[in-house]
Image (cartoon, rainbow, N blue to C red):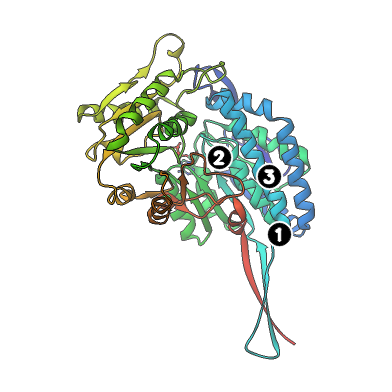
Amino acid sequence: MYINGEWLEALGGERFEVTNPATGAVIGDAPNGGASDAQAAVEAAAAAFGSWSSTTAYERSDLLYKAWQLMTERSEDLAQLMTSEQGKPLKASRAEVKYGADFLRWYAEEAKRIAGEVLASGRADQRFIVLKQPVGVVAAVTPWNYPISMLTRKMGPALAAGCTIVLKPAEATPLCAMAVTQIFADAGFPPGTVNLVTARDPKPIGQVFTSHPVVAKLTFTGSTAVGRQLAGAAATNLKRVSVELGGHAPFIVFPDADPVRAAKGAAALKFLNSGQACISPNRLYVHSSGADAFTETMVERVSRVRAGNGAEDGVGVGPLVNEAAVAKVERQVEDAVAKGAGAPVGGHRLTDGAFADGHFFAPTVLTGVAEDMTIYREETFGPVAPIIGYDDVDAVVEMANDTNYGLAAYVYTQNLSTAFRAFEGLRFGIIGINDVNPTSAAAPFGGMGDSGLGREGGHEGIAEYLETKLGGFAI
Ligand code: ADP
């Protein structure tokens, strides 16, 4: 763990093992921190806040640029580590490291653009000045599916704003978090500005993060259930909260779209990170006029995707994170098939030969998916593309909106009016229009409803870490 500028063991002295999800092999270990470690970390962050928050934006920007540079220089090692710890194919790990580094560069730039306002008053002798200041100590909890970019997406804006931060990465991926923290140490961030607490059991750390008086803000990315609980606890103590949670993205193919192009997009998007992404499409609504062409292209593409160890050339889909994840996907697929869905590709676990010690599910296409199936409502987080046929073009946006989640949605159409109506009518925070990658460090990412609160990335991302202060001046 990294607390107040020093690499430390947990106070309890224990460590926990980290395994490769493709092979089951132990690839390293990390200190098993507890409540006292978390307490020491938030107190170190509090002690560092005074001097860090009074640095100039230019100084903070220079350090973030340095961290971006180091991350870029170390990108190949980071990608290799990510593939062995998290499982995604190397090409995807390289893309994630670049995306992760982008947040550092973007917020190195945004640091210098934090600005207030001067407002007119109704009193001739009065002026108002609105000042933006850092909120204070930030506690961050991050998931295993994007083990580097989910850290930098929080660290970049928090540090640029002048906050200090304590990170608690997922128990499956502490090694990536240690490598990212080392970058900040090497870049020269002062002791206490960046702190890392690793733990096998996240609960005691979460308890400190949501209750310790010096923590001003909790930022969380993970499941809706845990996010709801942590946000509730933090809100009781009147801490600021941002939570980026689950999703159940619809992907709508309108009758005027090219169904082959849409299917190629869906196949590329759905199997990214083995479907373990909160913006992964979970309901593919395909108009009956294009259904055959769409399904044929999906089946052809998906049957060519090779599952396996992400470190091997040509592997397009890696393992799932653990056995529970495989069991969940299997349960959803069995439920759908039992209720009448077809599974022209995949539909089962992969357990033979090289798959024996990993957590693999075959890339799967389901056809004839209907509302009574669990997969229609529940987030999958696995390599399964559920196709739902529809005829009523006027009703499809409302069908897509029929979920408590509201993170990402995708639309394929060549008609400008249809595109606009869908863009405005879909109740989701991120809409891809003929676009399967509507994300960037420069753009706001976040959801509505059960998908969370707040936005990360873009200029909105730094606002989450700033407090507004009003000065009334009588002159
Ligand atoms: P997933 O189901 O995708 O693993 P989680 O929401 O369980 O998602 O995990 C996301 C992050 O939340 C991880 O860092 C995990 O350790 C952490 N976490 C899970 N439960 C708690 C908890 N009760 N308190 C604090 N952090 C938690």
Is 371 on the left-hand or right-hand side of 350?
A: left
Q: Quadrant of the C terminus?
A: bottom right
Distance of label 1 from label 2 (alpha carbons): 38 Å
Q: Which residue is mark 1?
A: 113
Depth check: give the residue in front, 130 or 385.
385
Mark 1 Cα-neighbour bin, 10 Å: few <14, some 14–19, many ≥20: few
Amino acid type for the residue under numbered disc 2: Gly
* Ligand 1 neighbours mark 3 (CB distance < 8 Å): no
Depth check: give the residue in front, 241 or 239.
241
Residue 34 marker: 2
Circle 2 — which element? loop
Q: Quadrant of the N terminus?
A: top right
Amino acid type for the residue under numbered disc 1: Arg
Residue 104 marker: 3
Distance of label 2 from label 3 (alpha carbons): 29 Å
Amino acid type for the residue under numbered disc 3: Leu
Where residue 340 appears, x then y in whole percent?
A: 20, 29
Q: Quadrant of residue 472?
A: bottom right
Distance of label 3 from label 1 (alpha carbons): 15 Å
Mark toward the viewer: 1 or 2: 1
